[in-house]
Image: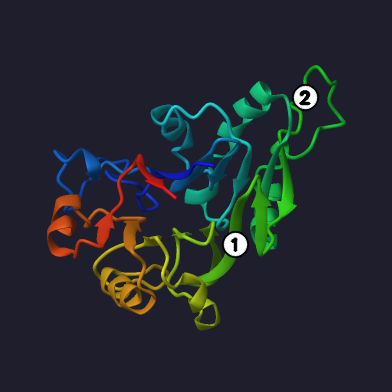
Amino acid sequence: MSVSLIILGCGSSMGVPRPDGYFGNCDPKEKKNYRSRCSALIKSTNENILIDTSPDLRLQLLRNNIKKIDRVLYTHLHGDQTHGINDLRVFYLKQKKVIPIYADKQTSMYLKKTFAYCFRNNPTKPRSLDYPATLKIHPLKKKHNFSKIIIDSIPVNHGNIDSKCFIINSNCAYVSDAKLIYENNINSFKNLKYLIIDCLRYKEHPSHFSLNEVIELVKKIKPKKTILTNLHTDMDYKTLKKILPSNIVPAYDGLKLKL
């Protein structure tokens, strides 16, 4: 069975350019510097598994010609990972069934409170006026098997909260928001085919990896290829390509990896 991962978006919380048009150090003439907020899609013959619902999700799905979403995994509760959730509604209408989503307890509580209309019918309204529930939350387990796609869920530190990273079929880790991989989990990250990892900026940040921190981590866990995501406006694509070794590359929106 063929399995691939598409990086739908690789930009930081305001994207590149920011909504006010600011590119920072990123060259606007380079198409790979146009970055929407982080989401990814695991794609196989049988399943389309979405990771996070970026605020830019609609455009990401259109650009990549995604016609169905079978389920959604959430890394954490922050707005740049969750606020595109309403764009899932069309897949409920099209597929005529509630879409399962998987999240940890903290993220589940946030989603149910903030987007309550997605999860419950309103008994006070006539059926003809009510929007039906389109999503159903399930607990995020340590390991899931979705049509032979094995996904391990591992907590990583993201400042004052933990985020979840996902290791797909034991060969690709998706770590979109992290400052630290806990030492007791470090062996799960060794000798991967792909490490897709948060690399916000050059300077150190309290809740995201910096470039030097990623380089030190790569020396320790030795993935075959490291792909930098969650890139801020000071992370110009061509500049990164020039200064990085060949086994570390910046992501770009639409990058597709065969797992």
Find residue 199 and report its image quarter. bottom left
Residue that lies at the very extreme toward the front in this rendered image: 1
Q: Residue at x 54, y 77 (%)?
A: 185
Mark whose residue sits in front, 2 or 1: 1
Q: Is residue 204 left or right of residue 242?
A: right
Q: Is residue 61 left or right of residue 227?
A: right
User: In this figure, which residue is indicated by the disc labeled 2?
Assistant: 130
Disc 2 vs disc 1: Cβ atoms closer than 8 Å? no
> Alpha-carbon distance for marks 2 and 1?
37 Å
Mark 2 is on which residue type?
Asp
Q: Residue at x 74, y 29 (%)?
A: 97
Residue 247 in the image: state x and y as whole percent. 25, 63
Residue 138 in the image: state x and y as whole percent. 73, 51
SS label for mark 1: strand
Position above or below: 38 against 226: above
Relative depth, front residue between 95 and 233: 95
Mark 1, Cα crowd under 10 Å, few <14 / some 14-19 / many 20+, is many
In this view of the protein, can residue 103 be seen by the observer? no
Residue 194 in the image: state x and y as whole percent. 39, 59
Number of the label disc, if any, that sits on residue 152: 1
Q: Residue at x 52, y 72 (%)?
A: 188
Find residue 30 and report its image quarter. top left
Number of the label disc, if any, that sits on residue 29: none
